[in-house]
Image (spheres, rainbow, N blue to C red):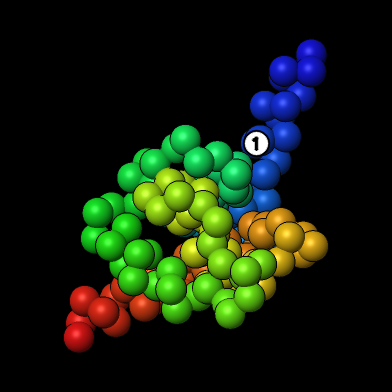
Amino acid sequence: MITWYKLRWLVELFFAALKGSGLQLEECLLERGLAVQRLMLLGFPCAIMILQLQRSRENQLLEARIVFSDDEITFLQILTPKLEGKTVKQQCSYTRGSLAWATWVIARLGGCKGYASERPAGVKTFYWGLQKFHAMLEGRSLA
């Protein structure tokens, strides 16, 4: 029963990423059910990415390649020194190339200050961070 409840909680987190905490799909003004279903299907990859980031905050064994392409990883490496603060506590302590490192970068872009005393980054922080990251990556490719 506990295992089933854990899986149920994961589903709840997934729908939180789709709804108010993340993509805010419940605020869409589509009238037809099929259109809403299609919109939700478009949001699934982003919600899954948010969950992957959220669940791998401390796991340095997973590689960033699980979630990000080679070009995205290269850009994450470029961003890391710019996002690290001046104090030791604001430096990224994760191994470069790990998913935990990429999660740290996205969380910083989403507004996380990087202090250990701060609450761990949540769905909104990762959503905002991913939006900013992809906008910056698009700007870089256009330049």
Q: Is residue 55 above or below residue 116?
A: above
Q: Which residue is mark 1?
A: 11
Q: Position of residue 18 (x, y in %)?
A: 59, 54
Q: Position of residue 44 (x, y in %)?
A: 47, 48
Q: In this view, which residue lies farthest toward the top?
A: 1
Query: Which of 45/87 is in front?
Result: 87
Q: Position of residue 125 (x, y in %)?
A: 63, 65
Q: Is residue 18 left or right of residue 72?
A: right
Residue 20 seen in the current view: no
Residue sitting at x 45%, y 37%: 62
Q: In this view, which residue lies farthest toward the front?
A: 88
Residue 83 seen in the current view: yes
Question: If the image is split into quadrants, where does the N terminus sit?
Answer: top right
Query: Which of 61/135 is in front?
Result: 61
Residue sitting at x 79%, y 18%: 2
Residue sitting at x 56%, y 67%: 91
Q: Is residue 125 left or right of residue 92?
A: right
Q: Is residue 30 left or right of residue 125?
A: left
Q: Is residue 48 left or right of residue 77?
A: right
Q: Is residue 83 above or below residue 23?
A: below
Mark 1 falls on what kind of element? helix
Q: Is residue 106 above or below residue 87?
A: above
**Within 10 Å of the Cα at label 1, are there few (<14), some (14-19), or many (20+) other Cα atoms?**
few
Question: If the image is split into quadrants, where does the C terminus sit?
Answer: bottom left
Q: Position of residue 46 (x, y in %)?
A: 47, 54
Badge count: 1
Amino acid type at circle 1 is Val
Q: Is residue 70 above or below residue 76?
A: above
Residue sitting at x 77%, y 64%: 118
